[in-house]
Image (cartoon, rainbow, N blue to C red):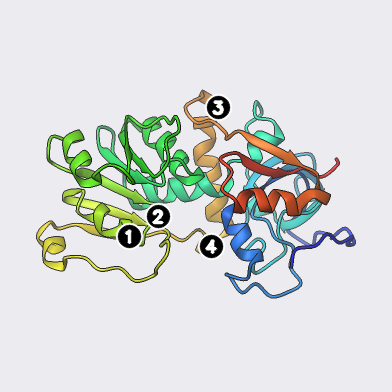
Amino acid sequence: MLSIERLDTPHPGHGESLVQIHAAAVNPSDVKNVAGAFKAPLPRTPGRDYAGTVVAGDGIGREVWGSGPGFGVARDGSHAEFVVMSSAWLSDKPPHLSMEEAATVGVPFVVAWNGLVQEGALKAGEVILVTGALGAVGRAVTQIAHWKGARVVGADIVERPCDCDVYVNAKTQDLIAEVKAATGNHGVDLVYDTVGGPMFDLCLRSLRVLGRQIAMASAGTRRVSFDLIDFYHGRQRLIGVDSLQFTGEEIAAIMDAIRPGFECGALKPFEAKPWPLDKAIDAYTAVEKGSPEKQLLVPAV
């Protein structure tokens, strides 16, 4: 059960930093965590993403952004006024982003970068398909793909403006046919599937020969089926991405890698709605209902 409590300010140990939180995003994974999906030991402060200032320990005065390994699950997270972390997990916030803007980046861009660049080895000139294109991860995938010179076919089940080069309403259109039409019948080079479940096989069938598919979620069911013979004849690859497995150093390195994209304007933070900490339950409820805005918890600083 989510509740607001007054706790003592934590103290950093050797090699640690105390970060005063200026803003912290509420992600869908935070809602799932509070609902018990990740079986976090209780009591536990949730929250994965943040932007803030180091006020004690190593690096006093640094303005930092990002996420943390196991935040909100294995250790207390960012939905608080302060959080202690290893100083090796810190990444400097782009100076031109406000704290609220910087707090929206975290997990969506980290998992997008890991799947596209580190695991998927995206190349300029390639065509990708992203499912859940209007969600936070899907929008981060689209931005990074464009930054790296790729073309994006986006798929989702609602109609809203997006930055995809081609948009497919998967509820009313034939995804495979639309992908083939957009790629000269070749299929896409890479799929970033943020949905899974019933979308999994459709995505796999949208790949070209030697294509690769990123899986990071599975809506509705955790088991899927596909034509194994077509899969190996196509010499395709299936790659799993799990942001809960990243180390703090890996997260910080990704935040450092995407910083130039924000500094040059190729990448942009999400629109957000701020909430005071005492309205955290309302913010979580908005995320649970699928609000397109990022919901932010903003402690009084």
**Residues at marks 3 and 1, CA–CA distance in whole angstroms:** 38 Å
Drawn side of residue 98 relative to residue 188, left or right = right
Residue where numbered disc 3 is placed:
263
The residue type indicated by label 4 comes to Leu
The numbered mark, 4 or 1, whose residue comes first in the sequence reads 1
The residue type indicated by label 3 comes to Glu
Residue where numbered disc 4 is placed:
244
Drawn side of residue 295 relative to residue 54, left or right = left
**Residues at marks 2 and 1, CA–CA distance in whole angstroms:** 8 Å
Answer with the quarter of the image where residue 197 lies. bottom left
Of discs 4 and 1, which sits in the foreground?
1
Residue where numbered disc 2 is placed:
195
Q: Name the one closer to the observer, 248 or 226.
A: 226
Q: Is residue 93 shown to the viewer in this render? A: no
Compared with 127, 253 (above or below) is below
Q: Residue at x 69, y 66 (%)?
A: 75
Of discs 2 and 3, which sits in the foreground?
2
The residue type indicated by label 1 comes to Pro
Q: Is residue 228 shown to the viewer in this render? A: yes
**Residue 84 position in % (x across, y down):** 76, 57
**Residue 107 position in % (x across, y down):** 55, 50
Q: Name the one closer to the observer, 21 or 175.
A: 175
Compared with 162, 33 (above or below) is below
**Residue 251 position in % (x across, y down):** 55, 52
Q: Name the one closer to the observer, 25 or 146.
A: 25
Drawn side of residue 158 relative to residue 58, left or right = left
**Residue 272 position in % (x across, y down):** 64, 36
Q: Which mark is residue 198?
A: 1
The residue type indicated by label 2 comes to Val
Of discs 4 and 2, which sits in the foreground?
2
